[in-house]
Amino acid sequence: MSFGKNMARFLALIFLLLPAGAFAQLVNPGFEKTFQVPEKDGESKKLTGAGWKFEEPLVFPEGWKTNPGAFKNGEYRIVSGSENVRSGDKCVYLRGHLSHNKAIDVAAGDELEVTFYVRDPGRKPAGICFYFYERNEKGKITSFAGSKQLNTTTSPEWELKNVVMKIPQDNQGRRVNSTIIALVSQTGAYFDDISLSHRKTASWLNFGDAYFEGRKKAAAGNYEGSRADFMSALGLTEKKDERIKALTGVYDTYVSEKDFKSAVGTLKLIIGNEKPDSRLNLDLHLKMADAYSMAKEYDLARGVLETVLEMGGEADEEKVGAQFKIADLWLREKKYDSAIDSYRKISGMKQSSPVDGIRAQFRTGEALALMKDLAGARTAYSGIPSMRGVSLVDRFDANRRIGDLYRSEKNHAGAREFYEKALGVDDVNDWEKAALLATVAETYESDGMLEEARKAYGKILEMGSKPWNNKKIAYSKIGALYRKQGEYEKERETYRKMLDWISNDISRLSYGGETEIYLVLSQMLKLTGDSYFAEGKTAEAREYYLRFLEIGRVAINNNHIKEVESKIGLNDASSLIRKAEDLFAKESYPGAISEYGNVISSPDANPRQKALALDRMGDVYTKTNNYVQAREKYAQSLKIIGISPEKKAETLFRMGDSYAMEKKYAEARSEYFLILAMAGIPDEMKIEAREKTAEIFRAECEYEKAREEYGKMLEMKGLSGRKKEEIRERIISIYR
């Protein structure tokens, strides 16, 4: 079907038939659901200020609220009991206005019929008030357009009543396209069981309603219905700007449907029939070029863009962009010589800025690279750093791209020369630099220069905390390089440093701190297991693999789980621990306790796994302030034979901490003293036990004893310089 026939078909649908009527959804029409209004909402204060009588605390039916601004000295209450209500258990007593919260989209000529039950022993009129509003094209209510109230008679018994409102085109000088209903009684009446029927007009009565509905349907993806509404709008106006709006809406629907031929035809109709001003004419031509481009009619698109280049001064701001589009279209067709010629024209245009020239030079380099003229591409990029208006980012990117070109030719030395120039540019963000350092490292590795590759990754580790993900990758890459050389212990030490780094620096991350620790922990455990496995130490590998399989709280790559299980076989206890950890993280404590119990009874569980399960059961009880039960589990864990001194120390810490939480400080110190007396545990565990002991004395205001413990810390092996400074400061400020 031709565009002209399409247009005729839609013009024939100007009087669009709509559904005869539908029941609108009212929230809580029988007032059965209620809620207590929070004091901070200020509704009680508003009612008091308007002189209303009401019961406190204030309770509203869900979906409804009083409107004290429309009625002074009113009265409102929820009425309960089957003898007082029409149906259900609740109704409302009202002297004033009770509004439904939801605005209803309407159009001129629509009919709203509200049906309700009402009773009034005084037989005074009661009814419905319709608040009118005007919305803008985006659907936002912009102004109040007045109201209309329709009353009906009442009697002492419940009676079914209804009122019908035909929506006007405007009210108080404003268009009406939204309304809110409110129950109304001037003297006091009971209301129950409200319903609303919305009968839409059989034909639009004004441009605004038809156009607004077209926009709504387009947003919902009903493009054919949207076009019909836009065409209806077109037949309801004599204003040029409104006709253009309607036809532009039609154009947008065709673009959304990828019917670019019809989209272009609509634009031509606007340009030919409506004689738009120069600015709009320019915009329409740019839209037309885009439509041709999306339709892959590149010659036609360029023809329209050439027309833009020939326009007067009103198009100056768009001419450089039009020339870029012409060049990009040549590039899309892989006609590189024509693209390069088009980019080179940009620098000579009077409207072109230095930034435009730099952008064109980058694009020229890209085109030359695509046509495999790498030397020409390097020449194009090498000219950028000396161009007028060039930024530091431009210098960085130009050198990086030259390096990439050398790298594509496997000339890694040449690539590194320009990568180093890029890295020498000041004020380029850390993420870009970290990524480029990783690329430098990869070139060294490709050349077999593993020590230099490690140094390049090491520079990433020396950077600040911002490129934290690059740092995580750098640790694993350094470890992999050590493995290549068979230096397994150095590899595993790298992974330990990775875990220490993320644990210490995680507070600097803006999000996901705890999750990231668990992710890095799972990575560290698997990589360490891989290292032992590669070295042939299968027992050690198995222990780290089991710990990897036990990590809960974060999603572990399923392929990694399968890979590990293919090496060590299935382990039921590790799967149970992982499940329990997930439940613990989700605060599903009964489920977590149950799963930890299953670990203890599992025939697959080794002593460490059983002790871990008991410790975690204790942690659940600690989390829920059941300290006695927690310590019972910790005590059971300590009795398990075959666990390491380090694992026992971890349990003693838990025991001591649980006492400290209950302010049973003497008992807590006893547990920490046991750790200090243990052999075969890391220095940092003893340092932590000494510090906790000092903190306990400090909490008891035993400042001299606390100072003594801090002093002992300063003499302990393994205390870092940073920690020493912190402890010295605590000694000085011991009384604070």
Image: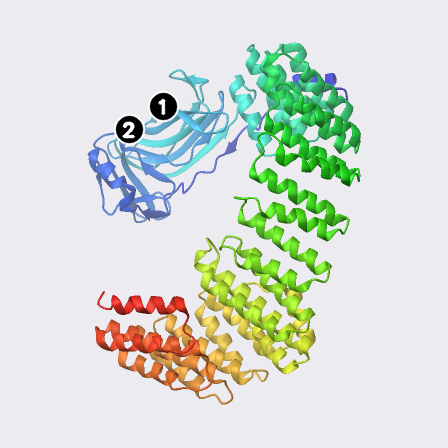
Question: Where does label 1 land, which residue?
Answer: 147
Q: Tell me which corner region of the image, top left, top right, bottom left or bottom right, holds residue 243.
A: top right
- Measured along the vertical axis of the image, is residue 543 above or below residue 555? below
Tell me, yes or no, if residue 535 can be seen here.
yes
Q: Amino acid at mark 2?
A: Ala
Residue 326, image x and y in percent?
72, 25
- Secondary element at tag 2: helix
Residue 162, image x and y in percent?
40, 30
Q: Nearer the viewer, residue 172 or 485?
A: 485
Quadrant assignment for the C terminus: bottom left
Q: Nearer the viewer, residue 668 or 268?
A: 668
Q: Residues within 10 Å of mark 1 (few under 14, many from 20)?
A: some
| Marks 1 and 2, the one that precedes in the sequence | 2
Image position of 34 (left or right of 324): left
Residue at the (76%, 52%) spot, across then down: 410
Residue at the (40%, 85%) spot, across then down: 635
